Image (tube, rainbow, N blue to C red):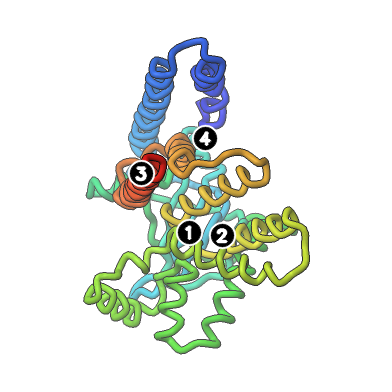
Amino acid sequence: MPCSIACAAALPIILIPIWLIYTEKIRSDYAWVILIGIFFSLGAYHYEKTVGDYKKNTALIAGKSSCVRGTITDINNLDHPRFKQLVSLAITEAHSTDNSLIKEIIGKNIHIYTAKKSQLTVDDQIELRNVAIKLPTKKSIELYLQKENALGILVRDFNTEQLVHRPTNSIRRWIYEKKMQLFSRLRSRMSAKTFTFFSAFFLGNRKINKNENDALKKSCKNWGISHYLARSGLHLVIFIMAWEYILRFIPLAFFIKQFILLLLTILYFLLTWNSISFLRAFLTFLCYRFFVLSSMQSHTLHAIILVSLVVLLCNPSQLFFLDFQLSFGITFLLSWINQFRMREKRMAQQNS
């Protein structure tokens, strides 16, 4: 069952306890237990299905030669002695050596490392022959591939003859080209050291200039500030505060300013390289803006819980990775401590 159909089928089941809490048809303690049980069951089912599908699909193609057609969804340039690019390919059609269709792997991804840069770009549809995917030997790589909905890793170069179709209009390709143009312009205007820091801190791309990047990480480790290189809520707050300060001097209505800020933040999200921590900050920002524009009461813990549920329902494998655990866990803990201290402060003021 596709993820979208499963979520649509589970939505009424999730909404029933929420409706019972809202209408006070049942004690809220019982309803919350039911709701937590439903989310846990859905997440466990989704995760087990992801693991089962991965093992079943890799067994179909492991060590076997096949013909694959797919769409390039992302291209990342690398600073590596052997590899120049990492290409993500979404499979749209696959055939075995006897020309039989392999339906099970359609929609899965393949990560392809290339020794030289190609002329292909995002949203190009290509065909690869004699594809033989090797299974990962390490459990950590296997878990990573499951999280990325990928079957495996290939090492091969591309040529223009492999191009099947290039769409005339493509939003995803336009976004990718604008992102790379912005990246190249900024890189040409800064020194190597400055741009390495700027790219890691503001663009979220740390796969450039390996020597400078290693030196930067070493310096941050000595000062105990390596976490600043992991772009997250702090970096997004700096971006938002800068634009809010600029918008103060522009005589526009409140809702127009909020719309402009939303648009700028979404563009910043689309034109940079994103991690799970930055995705958490971005989705939390969208929640807050929705609460503000709809005049609804907001609560930090509620927003974090809502975002974590959305992320885990879409990809429950994230729960077993350290970046998700640190990003959501520490943010939730700090928010809870802050709320607890604020409540104690209010109680002390009332007693005085």
Q: CA distance from mark 2 to mark 1?
A: 7 Å
Instruction: List x then y, in percent, for residue 224.
Output: 24, 70
Q: Which residue is mark 4?
A: 101
Residue where numbered disc 3 is placed: 348
Rendering coords of residue 221 (x, y %): 24, 72
- Compared to residue 54, the image places residue 126 above or below, namely below
Q: Residue at x 61, y 43 (%)?
A: 291
- At horizontal 30% and vertical 69% (from top left) the residue drawn is 226
Q: Which of 128/212 is in front?
A: 212
Is residue 240 at least partly visible in the picture? yes
Which residue was labeled with disc 1?
274
Asked whether disc 2 touches disc 1, contact meaning CB atoms under 8 Å apart, the reply is yes
Q: CA distance from mark 4 to mark 3?
A: 70 Å
Q: How far, Cα to Cα, is label 3 from label 1?
A: 42 Å
The residue pinned by badge 2 equals 269
Earlier-in-chain disc, 3 versus 1: 1
Q: Residue furthest front?
A: 352
Q: Which residue is rendered at x = 54% and y = 51% of the image?
A: 285
Which class describes the residues within 10 Å of circle 2: few (<14), some (14-19), or many (20+)?
Answer: some
Secondary structure found at label 3 = helix
Q: Quadrant of residue 8?
A: top right
The amino acid type of the residue labelled 3 equals Ala
- The mark nearer the N terminus, 2 or 3, is 2
Real-space Cα distance between discs 4 and 2?
38 Å
**Of the two numbered discs 3 and 1 in the rendering, the one whose residue sits closer to the viewer:** 3
